[in-house]
Image (tube, coloured by chain):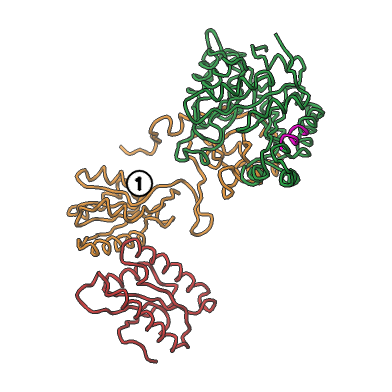
């Protein structure tokens, strides 16, 4: 899922400083699961902003709503009637949601409440870790199911570099060396010979370096 | 059991059911201070409810600091249902603290009341 | 495949090579590096020019190499994969060759986290092994990295790589060295050696695989100025092993700098007797002036002359 975290509340308040009434829109997708922008977080943020503004003698009226998914325009449309009389919309979705809302409501000031961080999973409740680099050309079959693109600090395809020691990355003792993990797993699988193959340079055009990407499935398109 | 009369008790089935929103609502509704009274640590009927409550209270204290109301207006205490005198002591202590802090700036007109959320009556 | 590198000629003719390292300055004057080049030129066969080592902004390694070459000392340009994509790497290396640079050392590069631009975006478009492979192919098959032919004047570098016997997983370090040789590396410089026992085990594995017959291995050494410097390398630099007895020896020494030089000379003398080692790479970090004495007292002076 997409892992996001709420921006400092002062920054969010600053974005809507000149508004009297705002709509806060949560998302029931990834950001609900990672506890950043679900119903509960949306209501907490609304309450916090209201309190902040009352303390400044400049009360703020808030409306809250949670879209099933903000990454599907059809779910954005469900809030049309809530949008009309607000001065701004605060989206608690990932960057996708903010953009779809902005696309639909041209005349509205739309701001992000979250920083979209990475694609990952929850290791334990309350701890999320990055697992996928969205490179568009998966190499996990060559690296024992451990992604060197995002989990190696240098995205090295023929690792590990000389900074790997005691299983940790040179950047921090809190970061596992992905290539140590790859080595251990390939060894356990009896496939160390695979690591002797020189992996060729990666085609980054399949990643964001090739410009904004699209995925199309003609067989499921309507009309 | 004697304690200051300015406290309104909100009963919850377990301090672990405390939600950030309930605490914020208390302040929005005019509380000058809020204290959460959970069971003694290690004595939770639901195992970890009071530990969770403390974490949430700490998170809301931090939020109150960030938004300018001040985390000092919120506190978590642990005591058992049999500790009446201790409850009175905490109530007085918290009342003193809030008096020192003054009325909640969210409610400039009226005198202070306090809300208490928790599972100790 | 022959190049115009003097270092290659020396190594190929069986001489025990001596290389040193010059770190470019954090300013725009070449005065200091030219001074070091004059000081070193009769004592070493070539010198590495680091490429913004530890991710600290410094004078360009290629520009510094040109100054050093002007002073009559052969440079080895270090090229990391951290700061340049494949377009910039190729462009810079074509330029370096046109300026008379003949030796190239390919590295991944230290992560920028600990440098003076920790908020920079890193590149790592290709890794060090891919860089070795692509530069070797550029030279031997006259192809750009993309596979497009180079019509004329392909750069003909003597291509080197690094190996760190002290990083983990230890068992894979020799395999990865072999991978670099497989990719096309012709000389190898190692991370500085303090744990001689581990280096000997590493070389034993190198010989078992016959790698020393396919590549020239130059063992890295670093003279230490103080026990604090030793302790720092021991505890704060990832991929480094410094045994306690070295720290202790420096701690007990009346003149720690002298002791550091003595230790380094002992290490070089020891290394010369390890089969499969073809040279020594002296990394006197910010202490270049001690290199002539170390070379001389290790019995490596005068340096052999080649055509």
Q: Vertically, is C138 above or below B27?
A: above
What tint does the image give chain C?
green
Q: Could you tell me which residue is drawn at 33 percent across and 76 percent down?
A: B98
Q: Is residue A164 left or right of residue C249?
A: left
Report helix, strand or loop for mark 1.
loop
Q: Vertically, is A117 above or below B84?
A: above
Q: Mark 1 packing: few (<14 Cα in 10 Å), some, or many (20+)?
A: many
The answer to which image quadrant residue C207 occupies is top right
What tint does the image give chain A?
orange
Residue C12 appears in the figure: yes
What tint does the image give chain B?
red
Q: Could you tell me which residue is drawn at 50 percent across and 31 percent down?
A: C26
Q: Could you tell me which residue is drawn at 64 percent across and 17 percent down?
A: C158
User: Percent from the top left, x then y, of residue A212?
Assistant: 38, 33
Residue A185 among magenta residues: no
Boundaries of the magenta span: C260-266
Question: Which residue is more in the foreground, C170 or C93?
Answer: C93
User: Percent from the top left, x then y, of residue A37?
Assistant: 37, 55
- Residue designated by label 1: A71
As drawn, the residue found furthest toward the bottom would be B1
Q: Which chain is mark 1 on?
A: A
Q: Could you tell me which residue is drawn at 52 percent across and 45 percent down?
A: A131
As drawn, the residue found furthest toward the front would be C254
């Amino acid at each position: 899922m997409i892992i996001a975290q709420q921006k400092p509340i002062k920054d969010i308040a600053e974005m809507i400083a000149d508004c009297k009434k705002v709509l806060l829109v949560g998302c029931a997708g990834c950001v609900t699961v990672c506890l950043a922008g679900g119903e509960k977080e949306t209501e907490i943020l609304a309450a916090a902003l209201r309190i902040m503004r009352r303390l400044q003698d400049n009360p703020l009226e808030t409306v809250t709503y949670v879209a099933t998914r903000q990454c599907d325009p059809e779910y954005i449309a469900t809030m049309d009637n809530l949008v009309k009389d607000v001065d701004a919309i605060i989206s608690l979705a990932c960057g996708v949601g903010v953009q779809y809302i902005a696309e639909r409501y041209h005349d509205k000031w739309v701001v992000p409440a979250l920083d979209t961080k990475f694609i990952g999973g929850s290791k334990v409740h309350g701890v999320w870790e990055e697992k996928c680099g969205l490179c568009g050309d998966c190499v996990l079959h060559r690296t024992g199911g451990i992604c060197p693109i995002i989990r190696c600090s240098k995205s090295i395809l023929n690792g590990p570099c000389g900074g790997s020691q005691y299983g940790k990355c040179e950047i921090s003792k809190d970061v596992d060396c992905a290539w140590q993990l790859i080595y251990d797993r390939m060894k356990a699988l009896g496939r160390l010979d695979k690591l002797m193959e020189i992996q060729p340079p990666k085609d980054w055009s399949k990643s964001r370096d090739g410009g904004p990407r699209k995925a199309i499935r003609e067989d499921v398109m309507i009309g | 059991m004697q304690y200051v009369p300015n406290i309104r008790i909100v009963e919850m089935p377990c301090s672990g059911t405390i939600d950030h929103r309930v605490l914020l609502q208390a302040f929005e509704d005019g509380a000058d201070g809020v204290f959460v009274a959970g069971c003694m640590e290690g004595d939770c009927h639901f195992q970890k409810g009071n530990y969770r409550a403390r974490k949430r209270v700490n998170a809301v204290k931090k939020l109150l600091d960030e938004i300018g109301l001040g985390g000092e207006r919120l506190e978590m205490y642990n005591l058992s249902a049999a500790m009446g005198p201790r409850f009175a002591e905490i109530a007085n202590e918290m009342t003193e603290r809030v008096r020192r802090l003054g009325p909640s700036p969210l409610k400039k007109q009226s005198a202070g009341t306090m809300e208490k959320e928790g599972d100790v009556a | 495949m022959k190049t115009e590198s003097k270092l290659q000629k020396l190594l190929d003719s069986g001489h025990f090579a001596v290389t040193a390292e010059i770190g470019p300055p954090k300013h725009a004057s070449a005065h200091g590096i030219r001074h070091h080049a004059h000081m070193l030129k009769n004592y070493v066969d070539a010198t590495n020019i680091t490429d913004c080592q530890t991710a600290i902004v410094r004078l360009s390694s290629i520009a510094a190499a040109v100054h050093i070459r002007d002073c009559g000392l052969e440079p080895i340009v270090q090229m990391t994969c951290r700061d340049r994509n494949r377009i910039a790497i190729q462009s810079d290396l074509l330029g370096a060759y046109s300026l008379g640079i003949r030796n190239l050392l390919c590295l991944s590069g230290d992560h920028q986290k600990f440098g003076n631009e920790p908020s920079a975006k890193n590149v790592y478009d290709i890794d060090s092994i891919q860089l070795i492979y692509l530069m070797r192919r550029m030279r031997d098959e006259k192809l750009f990295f993309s596979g497009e032919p180079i019509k004329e004047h392909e750069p003909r570098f003597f291509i080197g790589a690094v190996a760190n016997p002290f990083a983990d997983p230890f068992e894979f370090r020799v395999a990865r060295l072999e991978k670099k040789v497989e990719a096309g590396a012709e000389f190898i410089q190692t991370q500085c050696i303090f744990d001689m026992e581990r280096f000997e085990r590493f070389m034993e594995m190198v010989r078992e695989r016959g790698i020393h017959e396919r590549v020239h291995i130059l063992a890295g050494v670093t003279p230490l100025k103080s026990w604090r410097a030793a302790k720092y390398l021991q505890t704060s630099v990832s991929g480094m092993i410094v045994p306690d007895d070295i720290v202790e020896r420096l701690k007990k020494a009346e003149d720690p700098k002298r002791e550091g030089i003595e230790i380094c000379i002992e290490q070089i003398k020891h290394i010369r007797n390890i089969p499969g080692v073809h040279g020594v790479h002296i990394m006197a970090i910010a202490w270049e002036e001690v290199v002539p004495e170390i070379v001389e007292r290790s019995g490596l002076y005068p340096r052999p002359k080649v055509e």
